[in-house]
Amino acid sequence: MLPHSIDMALMLKLFLFTLLSAWSLRSMASARYMDKSFSLAARLHADDDSSSKCWESLLELQACTGEVVLFFLNGETHLGAGCCQAIQTIEHQCWPAMLTSIGFTAEEGDILQGYCDATTSSSAPPPPPPPPPPPSMEPNDVVTLGGFFLDP
């Protein structure tokens, strides 16, 4: 049997430990509570038009993965306009680190972004072709107008 003073000291320590544990559990539980405004949809801004554009661009990038792989493996220097548009939208308007998140290195992401930015800025639509010159008339040509011959 323990002396009365040791028994009281042990009981006090046990009480303080229990109180501290209860307080820390309460703090952790309240820290995990999230307001409904922090739902997944709110965090992703799913109701926002720009967010749907980001998701569409991500799906477009998935569709053109073959082009991107050939771009790096075979050195093909052509990515389709849709693929570049998706890369630019993701990098400039959505999630700049997304390309590294889906498996590209930071360097590959920079190369893709640089290529698409350069392609877009240098690919202004060509000017329309000049109109054909008017037909020249020789002095001895015969012109018909409404079935009548006109002699120049």
Image: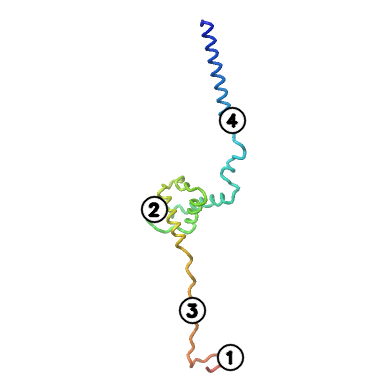
Q: Earlier in the sequence, mark 4 or mark 3?
A: 4
Q: Earlier in the sequence, mark 2 or mark 3?
A: 2
Q: Earlier in the sequence, mark 1 or mark 3?
A: 3
- Label 3 residue SS: loop
Residue beneath disc 3: 132
Q: CA distance from mark 1 to mark 3?
A: 27 Å
Label 1 with label 3: CB-CB less than 8 Å: no
- Label 4 residue SS: helix
At label 3, which amino acid type do we have? Answer: Pro
Depth-wise, is mark 2 or mark 4 nearer the camera? Answer: 4
- Label 2 residue SS: helix
Indicate the position of residue 61 as horizontal and vertical percent values: 48, 52
Residue 1 against residue 68 in the figure, above or below: above
Residue beneath disc 4: 30
Depth-wise, is mark 1 or mark 3 nearer the camera? Answer: 3
Residue 12 against residue 120 in the figure, above or below: above
Dividing the picture into quarters, in which one does residue 145 lie? Answer: bottom right
Label 2 with label 4: CB-CB less than 8 Å: no
At label 1, which amino acid type do we have? Answer: Gly
Residue 67 against residue 27 in the figure, above or below: below
At label 2, which amino acid type do we have? Answer: Phe
Judge whether residue 62 can be spotted in this image. no
Task: Judge the density around disc 4: few (<14), some (14-19), many (≥20) Cα neighbours within 10 Å.
Answer: few
Indicate the position of residue 79 as horizontal and vertical percent values: 44, 57
Dividing the picture into quarters, in which one does residue 11 lie? Answer: top right
Indicate the position of residue 72 as horizontal and vertical percent values: 39, 53
Q: Earlier in the sequence, mark 1 or mark 4?
A: 4
Q: Looking at the rendered structure, which numbered label has been put on residue 72?
A: 2
At label 4, which amino acid type do we have? Answer: Ser
Residue beneath disc 1: 147
